[in-house]
Amino acid sequence: MQTQDLPFAGSATETDPSPPHGQGEERSGRRWPLARRAPEDKCDPAELLVDITFVLALAQAGTLLREHSGATGVFQTFAAMAVIGCLWQYGVVALSMRVVAPVVKLLSVAQTGLFLGVAIVVPEAFSDHGHGIMRGSVLFAVMMTFAVLCGCGTWLTAAFGDREQVGNMSICIVANLLLAVGIWCALLVPMGWRPFVFLLSWAMFVFVGFFSTFPTYDRFRIGLHPGWMPFGIRAFGERYASAYTVVCCLSLELLEQIGQAVRISTPMLALVGTVLLVSCVMHRLYDSLIEPAWRALDGRNSTVSIARKQLLNLSYQVGHVVMFGGLVVAAGAQRAMFTTLSALPHTGLLGPAVSTSALLQMYLGVAVCLLAMAWFSWSASWKLEWTRVVAPFATAGMIPLLIGRPIQVAVIGLVTLCTLILWAETRMLRNGKSTKTTKTTKIAKTAKPAKALIPRQRGPRTLIRLTTAHHEVSGFELLFDVMVAFAFSQTDVLVMSEDSWAGAARGVLVLAMIWGCWMSYVWAANIADADTGALRGLHIVALIGMILMGMTLPRAFGTASFTSRVAVFLAAYLVIRACSAVALWLILGAKAGNRPWAVFASATGTAVLLALSTIEAPSMRPMLWIAGLACESLAAIIIARSRGVSAPGHLAARYGFIVIIGLDMSLGGMGRQMSGETIGTAQLLLVGLAMVACTIMWWLYFDALDRYGEHHLRQRTARNTAAPPRRRFDAVVHLHYNVLHLVALAGMISFAYGLRTIAGSLGRPGIGTWGPKMTVLWAVALCAGLALYAIAVAGMWALLHRKSFIPAMLAAIGLMVAAPFVAGLPSLPALAALTAAASILLLLEVLPAASGRRRRDVHGFLGSVQTAE
């Protein structure tokens, strides 16, 4: 998230002796207890992976609305989300107190796998399908119990060796164990009473946990204490903000459904468009609350009392669960409306009458989210804003007016209301009556350093604001990346729909097109602020184009003819490239020359060649695809050579986040493929093997490579800034981020394709415990995925002049050679063998002593950079 420094009355040295990120062990001189987490620490990639998987579990809990419509489904959904959400939130609090040690990262990765298992079995949490331990309710209790044990391990790590916090740590562990006991007790009661037991265990969890916030420490050694609070306030807030952003994007499930539909009607497109507008507006309403909440909760802010901070902490924990629940319920209602439109395609432009249950779920879900948001806003600013107070009641008040109305009227009414709320909030911001004019923020403004965004005075640059070296990723950019990830994931669906070598080759071309479009906007946002001015409008138009590309992709190239889906796909691509050319002109001004026209001309060539490939003879298609790929590469090169690096940390964070999204595509796609099926031993083995393989890929990149790449980027950026303008293009930097990260993403998507096809085949009749036999295409997808990822990681290290490229190349060649031998074997033993081969690569990376020294050196350097900034 993009924020300024927090220059409160007391300096960080006087009020908080927290060390910089990654330096807790070196500065304290001992390993335990772990040093306090610094307020400026960014969110660790392991934490973000947990957050995204947690949202997947919430989304799958929303599928309970399909099986039990009405109040029963809503009650079960909220009960399941309450027990899942409180477990995740206590992990967030624990990790915000101390620096993230390696053992904590391992626990976080383990919790990621457990949340994935919860996502698979939560639709069966209130049913008794199956036998013995394979019943859905029992599997849910088992997964939650292991997740609770991981949470207890995180708390033990956070407070180990700190005698002052033994009592509070014990309280939190007891609360976690009580939650697990309550979930198991729910198995002993009749089915209709299980949601009540879930909510009772959640209430006990919250009640016992809040004993650690009472002012009773001096008497009982349990309660409020200066050493018992979230010191890493930035990482704490970022995790909630990122989870809320992903929850806002749950409506993308409708896009996947519409992509698979045989016929797309105008009401279906209108419904999807209005639902996406609601998601963007809800995110914008929340985004304005992030910075005031961080400032109020920061331990260095002496203007806010401890009681207010505890109230804000409560609103973080309870209020966000309510927000998540409201949005999940609203997304379930929108899914039901879309299903109705799909079943009745000939109902006119406005669609059939909306059902009362769907209307109540959608409007009450949004109203509950707005009500929790109003509470969060009040606890952050200690001031009631009339727009946020009136908004939930106005939303609920519209329900009687819309009963029996068409679906489009109901959804458009919600969009209109949310837009009016956002407009009123924006007016208050401009008039200085928002939370940013409170006493706390006024203190911050008086001591604020120079603005991070510098407006230009002449030419087209007056429409944008250039960034500085300290620019960071904003919430809008995070929303942009999460929604663009939908288009990336659809390349996997394209290959699955065709299940042929031609489909795989076409998937590579389409992936390169989407990557080139995304990359151009990442570099534009690195030089100019994407959240303000004309660049924000270009991002919004590009986002709509990306969604249209992903929506039409699965069935666009299934036939040898130029269909309407192909036309929409190519038109959206040209619009995106036209916007990127305009962004290039805005940033460079008169220095742009003919480069914007060259970019658009290259993109037009790609579109024309791809259109010809749908109508030409099959023998000509490979040549046309290669030529289209060359034109797309030319457009990407023109944009890359036109831009330098303005904010190294921003660029490294955006590319690191896309790697996290790639790993989530592998896990989440497999989990959604198995959702609703009977869970057996084969499914559990597949989840375990996939989790091990994705953990290996995560560790190879995020153990030290991402931080060393950022360190190297900072050095090269500082050196290139002093060079003449014509020599500022750095081929090494662009090869590292633009090319090798594309190779890594292609590897993750290929591996995800293999996992999804295996997961989709496990439920077929006659499939044994070890899964179906591997086809040649499946085997090549899995082997090539791991090989491409290994080549990308090794290439990045080679560019940094820190490791040899030869061992990883030999490993990649070995994986590719193994593909013919893996084909024909049962899928699960074959996947286990490939995972073991990848584990050897990980051991070669982690075991050498030089690896540990490199990791400590780069973590220490970046910690000093964060402190200096």
Image: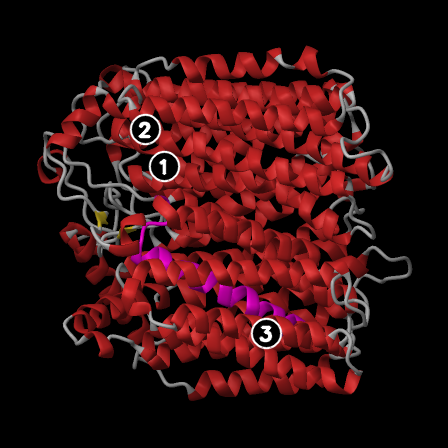
What's the amino acid at mark 2?
Ala
Dot 1 lies on which element?
A: helix
Dot 2 lies on which element?
A: helix
Q: For the residues carrying marks 1 and 3, which lies nearer the camera in this image?
A: 3
The mark that comes first in sequence, 1 or 3, is 1
Query: Can you give x and y, in whole percent of width and height, for residue 412 in the image?
Result: 64, 28
Per the picture, the main secondary structure of the magenta-coloured stretch is helix
Q: Which residue is mark 1?
A: 237
Q: Is residue 209 visible?
A: no
Is there a contact, CB below 8 Å, between mark 2 and mark 1? yes
Dot 3 lies on which element?
A: helix
Q: CA distance from mark 1 to mark 3?
A: 42 Å
* 528 within the magenta span: yes
What's the amino acid at mark 3?
Thr
The mark that comes first in sequence, 2 or 1, is 1
Query: Can you give x and y, in whole percent of width and height, for residue 768 in the image?
Result: 85, 62
The mark that comes first in sequence, 3 or 2, is 2
47 left or right of 815 in image: left
Q: Which residue is mark 2?
A: 293
Q: Nearer the viewer, residue 232 or 35?
A: 232
Position of the N terminus by quadrant = top left
- Which label number is shown at residue 606? 3
85 lies above or below 672: above
Q: Nearer the viewer, residue 729 or 739?
A: 729
Going 47% across and 22% down the picture, which residue do you hit? 421
* Magenta-colored span: 507-532
> Which residue reaches farthest right?
766
Count of marks placed on residues: 3
